[in-house]
Amino acid sequence: MLNVGKQRARTCGGVSRRELLRVGALAPLGLTLADLLRLPSAQGADRSAAGKSPARSVIFLWLWGGPSHLDTFDMKPKAPVEYRGPFAPVPTNVPGIEICELLPGLARRADKYAIIRSLNCASNDHGVAGTIGLTGSDTGAISLSGQVLPGQVKPAHGSIVSRVEGFEPGTPKFITMGGRLHQGKRAISGEGGGTVGSLHDPFRLDYDVEQGVKIPDITLVDGQTPDGLSSRRALLESLDRLAARFDRSATAGRLDQFYAQAFSLLTSTQARKMFDLDAESDALRRRYGRFRFGQCCLLARRLVEAGARFVQVNWSSHVEPVEDTGDGGWDMHDRNFQQMQDRHCWMLDQSLCALLDDLSERGLLGETIVVAVGEFGRTPKINDKAGRDHWQQCYSGLVAGGGIRGGQVIGSSDRRAEFPASRAVTPADLFRTVHDRMGIGTTSLTASGIAPQGEVIEELT
Amino acid sequence: MSGSPKRRHRRDGPRRIGRFGASVAGIFVAAALAVAAAQEPKTGELVRLTRDGHFKQRPAWSPDGKQLVFARHRGATIFLFVVAADGSSERRLTNRTDPEYDAVFDPEGGAIALAVDKTSPNQGDIDIHTGKSDGSDLKPLVVSEGKLSHEEWPAWSPDGKQLAFTSTRDGNQELYVCRRDGSERKRLTSDPAHDAHPCWSPDGKSVVFATGRWGNLELASVEVESLKITRLTESRGLDDYPAFSPDGKKLAFVSNRDGNLEIYVADADGANPRNATRHEAIDNFPAWTPDGRLTFVSNRDEGFDVYVKSKVD
């Protein structure tokens, strides 16, 4: 089932093009059409690095809120009870590697992925660390208090791929599943094109267990359907002509491209098939899990299978758990162990295992990098509310597929998982490595006007 | 009372129906009995009570077995719902807007206790309220004092005079008991490890709970008077959510000792644990109907729903 959002948008002057089809990349940034036209122009794609790498696509599982590394991939059973928590490590199918007992499926597949246990970043604020995790840099990040850090927001990892590959109407390179990311009621920065422009913002999708696949950021006039929209193409074209003064500029041409992409995704039979999870067997859908994250992972596989280059699946839009009226993020300041045991860990385990298996069975894992990481970890010392607070000094991530060498652990933490003990790496290093595996190296980046950040983690490749 | 309309109707009914009517009625009664027999759960039969698939936690039966209460996660909400024994007639327990969960009926069935959550800026402030069993007249019973703390997982003693619960009020999650009016609060455990999910023994003298003091979660009991701790399980996996059967002879709990979360049923002292669910899906939150049927939450079909197993060996 494909679901398209609806919204009243009428004026006394009738239906405007912008009202008829709002492209979501604009709304989250609070941009108007005029704002978009003023954005920096994108350069032509540099494909010099393409084709050299075995990795064709990336599925980036963004574990928003910050999972506890001590209760997932970096357990410390010998630490004092105030640190180690109530869960035990279990052996994996790779001798010497142990992970949490709440991840039994992943324990049986450790040969397929690498664990990084020495990630760290510069902030324990969700907003700032989130921007670092998504862009590799804190420039332009927005803190919880609303402070905006100096500098322009750098492009998201997927936007870099879109920029280097080049924008193609009807074929989004960068797709994000989930709404805009928030901490509290404040949206964070770093989800889109940043310095390379909104043209490289992600095309957004989402999945709702009751409504099915949603395109939340494209809102139609009340009563419109994608089919109805198709029949009104003539109207759109006439509206286009009214906007001829914009169309004369090259920048507006890119805007048209963006509209065209949204339009084609709404109306093309092929694209709608791509979004149609009902085309998958019931057994496979169950393997992924009949919950939002699981079905988003399945949709991500369908998208990369259809040619998408970078698909980001947001675990949640809010860092807060449901107990704090969020939508189930990993920010477990309290009730950490109950939530990890009852919900988050098995959800991640089920969906990620299904994704790895499904990609492998279809021969896609070798060309698809899968990354699962949050913006930081959680305090090794358990707080006084049976929870763990923010901890950016040391945390873990998982990387698989696309030429990444599995069955290994990169870096290590100290005896209480408080600080890296060896091979400290940053989010910028991680995604420099991911881009490198996709054939996007220094030459491609600089040719696209993007300053390279971080260093390739050679051990992963 | 002999003149009550109800009794008069019963006595006069067959005469009004007549012989033919009685025969027809007899056929219908026989048919109804046949249908009822067909609907009677067979040994080991699994009945799915809910079908929405949203995540659910801690199902709990009323003492007469006519109502089931559980918490459902949907979107950004956790609310308590009550259904009839066959899963029908669903309604919300309260009309609160903040998260609520862990509701349990008292042994007499007239009252209910539940955990009441707060959202930011009081994230992590959870209190226990009690009220009438229909969710009305809720009043705070155990609340945070001085600083934010969790007061949760209420469990009534068999005689209904006390409640056990967990609290983080002293800086670590520990077990406590109090009278049903909140007075005479007593701390049962004092260990830096995680203690959770209390469940009264049938004789009301001890409380069984999950604890991380020996590594990962295991079941233990604490005597309410002496505070003596006895270890009940020792498995390679976690053991959690203990629940005594109504006759007090069986102890159900969740365990991942065989690789994934299953419901196990052991003797009352934790010995002889048997896997009662045996399914690759996740089975969690065991509870018992008053007539001894095992109830739990599972994702074996579409999403998470409440199931009742008719007989457990």
Image: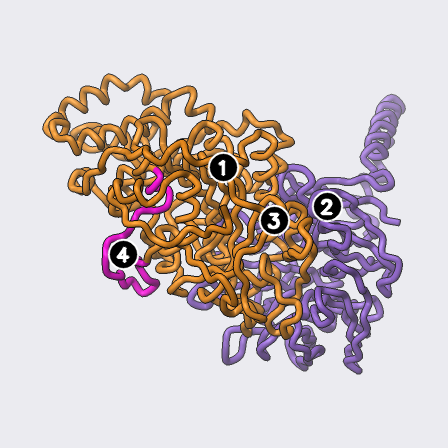
Label 3–label 1 contact, CB within 8 A = no
Q: Quadrant of residue B183?
A: bottom right
**In the rendered structure, the residue with mark 3 lies on which chain?**
A
**In the rendered structure, the residue with mark 2 lies on which chain?**
B
Q: Please state which amino acid type lies under the numbered disc 2.
A: Ala
Numbered mark located on residue B27 in the image: none
Q: Residues within 10 Å of mark 3 (few under 14, many from 20)?
A: some
Question: Nearer the viewer's eye, disc 3 or disc 1?
Answer: 3
Task: Evaluate whether label 4 is on the same chain as label 3.
Answer: yes
Q: Which percent across, then down, holds residue B43?
A: 87, 41
Label 2–label 4 contact, CB within 8 A = no
Task: Identify the chain drawn in purple.
Answer: B
Q: Residues within 10 Å of mark 2 (few under 14, many from 20)?
A: some
Numbered mark located on residue A368 in the image: 1
Numbered mark located on residue B85 in the image: 2
Q: CA distance from mark 4 to mark 3?
A: 37 Å
Label 1–label 2 contact, CB within 8 A = no
Task: Evaluate whether label 3 is on the same chain as label 1.
Answer: yes
Q: Which residues are magenta?
A: A138-161
Q: Which residue position holds label 3?
A: A407
Numbered mark located on residue A140 in the image: 4
State whether residue B126 is above or below residue B300.
below
